[in-house]
Image: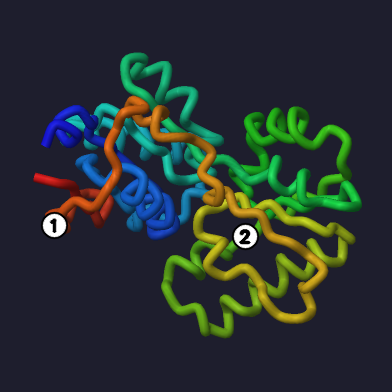
Amino acid sequence: MSAFLSTPCVGMFDSGVGGLSILRAVRERLPYAPLRYVADSAFAPYGERSDAEILDRCLRITEHLLALGARVIVVACNTATAVAIDALRARHPTVRFVGIEPGVRPAVSASRTRRIGVMATSATLRSERIAALLRRDASDCRVHLQACRGLAAAIERGRRDDAELRALVELHAGAVRTAGVDTVALGCTHYPSCAPRSSGYSAMAFASSTRPMPWQRRSCGCGPGMRAGSASSRRRATRCGWRHSWQGGSR
């Protein structure tokens, strides 16, 4: 009980189902934390919207999560992190925000040829944040940027065996393969579920932004003495302006 009482409520959001992989990781690491998750499926995917639209949605959802009691907010979306996290931190300086970024550093570490690819949304790739990330972590590499238009939306529709989805994966991953890279950073939380596994891609490694998690328990305000272990949870789904909201945590 004391562990639960000392754990802050964690709010999370993404433009749909992609952030559920982050939610599962947080649930494993913080079994006592009350969680509030918003899947903004009504506006998914963020990566094909303007920066102004993305920022507006992020601000609105943040206000909603704060009203639900969140003290830490995980922006479980590469695009939302790239476009909005600095503005969110400026608007709410007392709230801790944790973002998700493409796994460029793991990709660079795994690359033998110093030729890497980054598969991400158009909005992520046009951001200054990704440019700074590449300057910091991949300055000595040749980088191919692949804007995967339509891919997150196809994944969001939820049919992995869909011919359109397979064609989009082949289109974008094939372009990266043709560029001659040996490692690819997946810059969208939707993408790991459909990374190509055929023999035609055996020479390429895929680095996800969710493994390893780019933050530790202390990033969510939990001290080193936090006791891990199983905890019962109560979950309820509610409908809201952005279509789906998930709430869970120990009671």
Which amino acid, by three-letter code, is at mark 1?
A: Arg
Please tell me which residue is depicted at 82% across the width and 51% down the height of the picture: 111
Position in image of residue 127 (x %, y %): 63, 35
- Residue 51 can be seen in this image: yes
Quarter of the picture containing the C terminus is top left
Which residue corresponds to the image point at 18% horizontal and 47% vertical from the top-left?
A: 249
Q: Is residue 196 above or below residue 161?
A: above
Q: Which residue is mark 2?
A: 149
| Residue at x 19% of width, y 28% of height | 6
Residue at image mark 1: 236
* Residue at x-position 83% and y-position 59%: 182
**SS class, disc 2:** loop
Can residue 50 be seen in the rendering of this structure? no
Pointer 1: residues within 10 angstroms few (<14), some, or many (20+)?
few
Secondary structure type for disc 1 = strand
For the N terminus, which image quadrant? Answer: top left
Q: Nearer the viewer, residue 242 or 179?
A: 179
- The answer to whether 170 is drawn above or below residue 23 in the figure is below
Q: Percent position (x, y) of residue 250?
A: 14, 46
